[in-house]
Image (cartoon, rainbow, N blue to C red):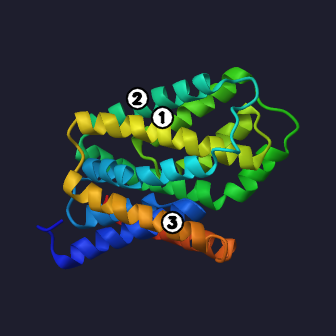
Amino acid sequence: MSQLALTDSVLLLAAALAGGLLNAIAGGGSFLTFPALVYIGVPPVAANATGTLALLPGYLSATYAFRNHMAPPPGMSWLGVLGISALGGGLGAALLVITPDAGFQRIVPWLLLVATVAFAASDWLLGRIYRAGRAVPAVVARAVLFGVTLYGGYFNGGVGILLLAALGLVGMRDMGMANGAKNLVSFVLTLIAVILYARADVLVWSLALPMMLAGIVGGLLGGILGRRLPRRLVRAVVILTGAIMTVVFFLKA
């Protein structure tokens, strides 16, 4: 961080702080951390990996917060759920590290678009899934869960909303329990992905570590402000941010 211009350092720390805050309240932190890293000149693949690492502590703290309100989906064990999560996250990370920066830069706008649309439609989507009378067939549900964790290992943006949808398809009908499972799955798939990012040497540690600290502070602030800020306002901020970043990256592609 010391080799960066002061404005770049402030930008990264502010993005991580705000990203941790948003993730604690509603999700969408990657809409801030990834563009900030790209803006200061970090190559797209390294920016995605580094931003994912920066937000990892937030998943751990959220998992701890839900430790007394967690259960695996009906018909599945934690071993099965976390096995799917580790496999999907690992394969997604492996795909990322072999993707050329130029190719990833062309894909990013579409990934941001998917994440933004998923977030914007989340209330409608989750409402329909969680009000459904029964789960989809087990094979289909597990395939969906694997696909979402694969996406999470590759990009991570908007993965929380997609995981809630996947867990609903698996058969979870209690949103509180689903949130607890989502946090644990997010932590596991992100941890596996980060390990592979580190082995592939695509992490910018000098940027990630200070951003991790800022993300922790943001998560703590989110835990406090989450009870005071109107949820509709926070969602609007996340959706607007995602939409702006999507347009910007489409223009740059």
Give the foreground label among 1 and 3. Answer: 3
Q: As displayed, is residue 71 above or below residue 208?
A: above
Image mark for residue 220: 3
Image mark for residue 150: 1
**x 72%, y 51%: residue:** 125
Res 85 seen here? yes
Res 249 seen here? no
| In front of the other: 181 or 113 | 181
Image mark for residue 91: 2
| In front of the other: 118 or 179 | 179
Residue 219 vs residue 209: left or right?
A: right
Position in image of residue 119 (x %, y %): 60, 58
Position in image of residue 48 (x %, y %): 33, 51
Residues at discs 2 and 1 in contact (Cβ within 8 Å): yes
- For badge 3, the amino acid type reads Leu
Q: As displayed, is residue 191 above or below residue 217?
A: above
Location of the C terminus (image quadrant):
bottom left
Position in image of residue 230 (x %, y %): 68, 76
**x 51%, y 66%: residue:** 220
